[in-house]
Amino acid sequence: KEERLEWFQDAKLGIFIHWGIYAVNGIDESWSFYNGYITYPDYMEQLDGFTAKNYNPKDWAKLIAESGARYTVITTKHHDGVALWNSKHSDLNVIDKTPAKKDVITPFVDAARKEGLKVGLYYSLLDWSHPDYPNFLRNKKRYDQDDKRWNNFTKFNFGQIKELTKYDPDLYWFDGDWEQSAEKWKAKEMRELLLKETPNTIINSRLQGYGDYATPEQGVPITRPDSNYWELCMTMNDSWGFQHNDKNYKSVNQLIRILVDCISMGGNLLLDIGPKADGTIPQEQIDILKGIGRWTNKHKSA
Ligand code: JFZ
């Protein structure tokens, strides 16, 4: 049993945050251009609409704490490659490229910690905007053989991940590992780097076998997973990021049942919210977080 994993085993509820330029049009995060629903240039035009002008990270942190969650995970970069912190490795970030003009990660990390929350950072290993990333817009053949370009990308990826270590995250939540092998990501080296820089951290499962815990797929597992540490991530409606047309919210009671199912089998629920481009959280999502909080806070000592 590892000490650094102890808080996680008892965390029960975490709140996931998918925030990015995709909230401007309210479309699928990154997948909308990958799947051809919108052109890449049109997708990137959303940069101009990412204002964050009503962004209040203290309110976010307070609301998350009020839900009874013990940790939170925020997207620092989705598959679209747009960094939400002040990355020096690419100017495709919200400071240089959007009217928000500010690092939105640092104040959130600070506010969440003040609320006593553990903080996780979501980072997409794959980057569909990077010119040296293979498979861009499914153009696999063109890049796959090119070691030089892959080495460039690897350097870039390690550079950005190294930057994230400055936050001393309690958790790294990687995504997008399915597009390359462990060898190509240098997953082992990545894990070693992270545990060297931030020894108390936890790494999620999406690092081609080099993570610390399991992620059951497609809903609540029917029986207790083999792993002592696991987490189900789930949306409140049918979208990760903000989508104004998606009103298909689960009820508070449904979500509490899912939460209890996870807890009863020794796992955690990472429940997702998708703030709007101005930084406000949709009212339905606020209501759900408060609704869950009314229940969890009755059971705080449990
Ligand atoms: C990935 C992303 O592509 C998606 O946009 C979102 O960020 C989500 C949290 O993660 O999508 C996945 C990847 C794997 C599974 C589900 C959604 N899975 O293994 O069940």
Image (cartoon, rainbow, N blue to C red):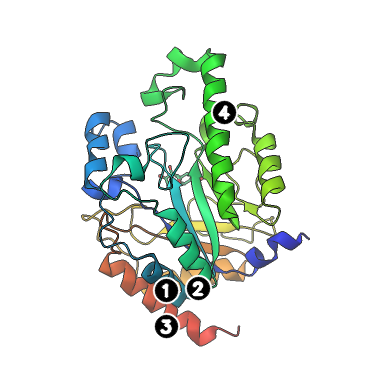
Q: Secondary structure at mark 2?
A: loop
Q: Which residue is mark 2?
A: 115
Callout 4 crowding tier (Cα within 10 Å): few <14, some 14–19, many ≥20: few
Which residue appears at 57% of the width and 60% of the height? 222
Q: Residue furthest right?
A: 1
Find residue 96 and report its horizontal and vertical position in percent. Answer: 33, 40
Q: Which is nearer the N-term, disc 4 or disc 1? A: 1
Point out residue 241 in the picture as x, y percentages from the top left corner: 34, 52
Residue 49 x/y as whole percent: 22, 47
Pointer 1 and pointer 2: residues touching (CB < 8 Å)?
yes
| Of callouts 2 and 3, the N-terminal one | 2
Of residues 98 and 262, the one nearer the viewer is 98
Task: Tell which tag, 3 or 1, sits nearer the viewer.
Answer: 1
Q: Tell us which disc is closer to us: 2 or 3.
A: 2
User: Which amino acid does the dot numbered 2 rest on?
Assistant: Glu
Q: Secondary structure at mark 3?
A: helix
Q: Earlier in the sequence, mark 3 or mark 1?
A: 1
Q: Between marks 2 and 4, how big is the CA–CA gap?
A: 35 Å
Q: Residue at x 68, y 41 (%)?
A: 193
Instruction: Indicate the position of residue 165 as horizontal and vertical percent values.
Output: 59, 48
Report whether 60 appears left or right of 216: left
Q: Check disc 2: other Cα within 10 Å, few if <14, some if 14-19, many if 20+.
A: some
Q: Which mark is residue 155?
A: 4
Q: Amino acid at mark 3?
A: Arg
Distance between mark 2 and mark 3 Cα atoms = 17 Å
Residue under pointer 3: 294
